Image (spheres, grey):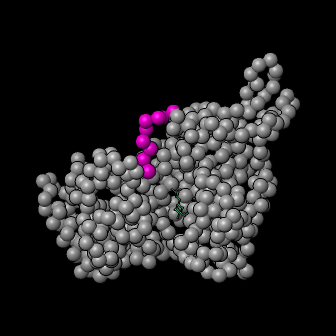
Amino acid sequence: GFTDNTIIVVFGASGDLAKKKTYPALFGLYRNGYLPKDVHIIGYARTKMDEEEYHKRTTSYIKNPNNDPEVAAKIEEFKKLSSYVSGNYDDNPSFQNLARHMEAIEKGYKTRGVNRLFYLALPPSVFVPVAQHVKVCCYATNGTNRIIVEKPFGKDLQSCRELLSSLKQSWQEEETYRIDHYLGKEMVKNLLVLRFANVAMGAAWDKHSISSVQISFKEPFGTEGRGGYFDEFGIIRDILQNHLLQVLSILTMERPVSFASEDIRDEKVKVLRSIPPIKREDVLLGQYVGANGKPGYLDDDTVPKGSVCPTFAATTLWINNERWEGVPFILKAGKALNEAKVEIRVQFKDVTSGIFKDISRNELVIRIQPSEAVYLKLNTKTPGYAFRAIPTEMDLTYKRRFTDTNIPEAYEALILDAIKGDHSNFVRDDELDVAWKIFTPILHWIDGREGPRPKPSPYPYGSRGPKELDSFIEKLGYKRGTGEDYSWPTTNVS
Ligand code: BG6
């Protein structure tokens, strides 16, 4: 097949991302039989270590909680198809050595043509030199070459453009795969099917029916240990500008001409171009403080004293097109909150007044994680003699409906796409450009480039966020359930 003769090189093989995400994903694909036949994985990093140490590190996050012998055997097989090369990130001899290592493996191929996939699990400071050296020393002339890169893609519009154009000096857009791992998540991919394969959904999908949309990301832990990185970026660059905006674009784009990757990405860019830069009054910032024995953001030794870096942000975006004019899209994300949850909450408008009093609005909730689900809150007659409406839900919880299905990890899905050459779930250059246009003005304000830096509102570790959050959302017309007290039945969540 066209993916035979594949070598995957993981740069930054001894780093955190490789250990926690890349290798476990490669193993998941291998275990389920999705890696190409005779694939070979090469780890590359500066650290000098022998193969045993390399294997120990790269398999340390691969889970086998019950010591299943079958999984253990697969791990041993997986180690056999992986080797390690150490070298620098900025000199030709190191990369020539890597090239020789690849060529030695490729000598054994029975068919012609090679596929080389270069995965840059690296900090931004070495992105560009590695990409350039790989191009000069390791680029296959008899096959395909692909490069996978990860955020951060700059810190604002200008630095992003600079980074992209440096990378473009050596790599074509068709060879480049920019990861936003939210695009690999099952429920994010499902948006295309939910929206475009259901007339019932499509019919109500606009400003006439929808009152507001919230896309929220909640994590129950702080930035412990990662404070140095985080403080330079903040929650908006870490989550909103990429992960949540990607979800927003798929949720709101027009129907693509086809599911070909460029057709999808064209539509995403179009809708993003209809979003003006976020205004200051549409922003709420927060920073967590110590509570219940948990440390505050500023208690982390890796965080600069007195930092005003936001660890929580809510922003309202407006889409200036016929479908969405006037509908607020609230993107909100926070660290050290009360729960782990990522969801999309679409709230519909009130029913025509007159016959019902105190009736709840419909809401469509797409829960991305944990426990993937789609549910629609709707009103029904109380069963029995009384004629009264009560809120209830139509519930598609994956665990219950698709009991035996294995949902792949985001990174598994994305690496497989890159091996196959499918760009649909990767971020195109122009997408990134408009994403930064939307966020750059408020980021410059928050960074203090236009005067004093805004102070984030404090919220206790483990809380729902800053106390201003409810009024921020309610002023946009969001209504909590009225009438009967509605709560998601806890027995539904397994
Ligand atoms: C990363 C952020 O991109 O996404 C992290 O840098 C965040 O801060 C992570 O924790 C969340 O990913 P997931 O898949 O756990 O929701």
Left/right of residue 172 with respect to residue 331 in the rendered view? left
Q: Is residue 110 visible?
A: yes
Left/right of residue 62 with respect to residue 187 in the rendered view? left
Q: Is residue 288 visible?
A: no
Q: Main secondary structure of the magenta part?
A: loop
Residue at horizontal 69%, vertical 69%? 289
294 or 184, nearer to the observer: 294
143 or 468, nearer to the observer: 468
433 or 280, nearer to the observer: 280
Which x, y percent locates residue 7?
25, 60
Q: Is residue 354 above or below residue 272?
A: above
> Where is residue 128, by image quadrant?
bottom left
Left/right of residue 479 with respect to residue 254 in the rendered view? right
* Magenta span contains residue 234: no
Left/right of residue 343 with respect to residue 121 in the rendered view? right
Q: Is residue 374 above or below residue 19?
A: above
Which x, y percent locates residue 349?
75, 40
Which x, y percent locates residue 427?
47, 59
160 or 383, nearer to the observer: 383
Which x, y percent locates residue 458?
73, 68
Residue that extends furthest to the top in the rendered view of this protein = 385
Q: Is residue 44 above or below residue 29?
A: below
Q: Quadrant of the C terminus?
A: top right
> Where is residue 194, by image quadrant?
top right
Q: Which segment did they paint magenta?
A: 401-409
Residue at horizontal 64%, vertical 75%? 299
Residue at horizontal 27%, vertical 65%? 42
